[in-house]
């Protein structure tokens, strides 16, 4: 395994599974982070967003880490276009309906034009 500190925290790259990274969380309860992550994934899928994507979760490894779909984190987006902003507003509105608030997140442009949201350790219950 290879270690790297990237935008999504400490990430372990398993050469036998090149499309999966191991995300280490700083949250005391990893189950909350996994639940926030999965909820965002489900909302994006249900709304059939065209731009916004959430990396798939593959497995909980232990109390501090889980497997996540590997994304390209070379180009961070700080000023979303109108279409992406609308999808983000829909996501946040639906999260608020579920009593979840996103205080911080990161967006990364992918080669196919989609944008992945990561950093689910800054979500909380309201």
Image (cartoon, helix red, strand yellow):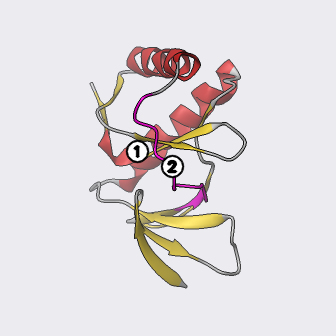
Give the distance between the C-alpha atoms of the residues marked 1 and 2, in whole angstroms. 18 Å
Q: Sequence-wise, which precedes: disc 1 or disc 2?
A: 2
Q: Look at 49% across and 19% down and name the residue there.
A: 85
Which structural element holds mark 2?
loop
Specify whether 36 is left or right of 19.
left
Residue 63 vertical placement versus 94 (above, below): below
Q: Residue 121, position in %: x, y?
A: 34, 47
Of tags 1 and 2, the one toward the viewer is: 2
Residue 63 vertical placement versus 12 (above, below): above
Q: Do the residues labelled 1 and 2 touch (CB within 8 Å)?
A: no
Q: Residue 84, position in %: x, y?
A: 55, 23
Which structural element holds mark 1?
helix
Residue 91 vertical placement versus 75 (above, below): above
Furthest residue toward bottom: 1
Q: Is the magenta stretch mostly helix, strand or loop?
A: loop
Q: Give the range drawn in magenta.
A: 67-79
Specify whether 99 is left or right of 37.
left
Residue 43 vertical placement versus 105 (above, below): above
Is 72 within the magenta? yes
Residue annotated with mark 2: 75
Residue annotated with mark 1: 120
- For the N terminus, give its image quadrant: bottom right
- For the C terminus, give its image quadrant: top left
Dot 2, how many residues are within 10 Å of its Cα: few (below 14), some (14-19), or many (20+)?
few
Q: Residue 72, position in %: x, y?
A: 59, 55
**Quarter holding residue 47:** top right
Q: Look at 40% across and 45% down and name the residue there.
A: 120
Q: Look at 69% across and 73% down and name the residue there.
A: 17
């Amino acid at each position: 395994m290879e270690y790297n500190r990237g935008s999504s925290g400490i990430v372990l790259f398993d050469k036998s599974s090149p499309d999966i990274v191991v995300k280490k969380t700083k949250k005391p309860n990893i189950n909350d982070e996994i639940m926030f992550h999965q909820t965002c994934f489900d909302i994006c899928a249900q709304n059939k967003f065209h731009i916004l994507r959430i990396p798939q979760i593959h497995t909980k490894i232990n109390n501090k880490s889980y497997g996540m779909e590997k994304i390209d984190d070379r180009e961070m987006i700080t000023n979303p276009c109108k279409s992406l902003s609308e999808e983000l507003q829909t996501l946040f509105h639906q999260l608020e309906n579920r009593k979840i608030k996103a205080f911080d997140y990161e967006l990364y442009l992918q080669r196919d034009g989609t944008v992945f949201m990561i950093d689910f350790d800054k979500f909380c219950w309201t």
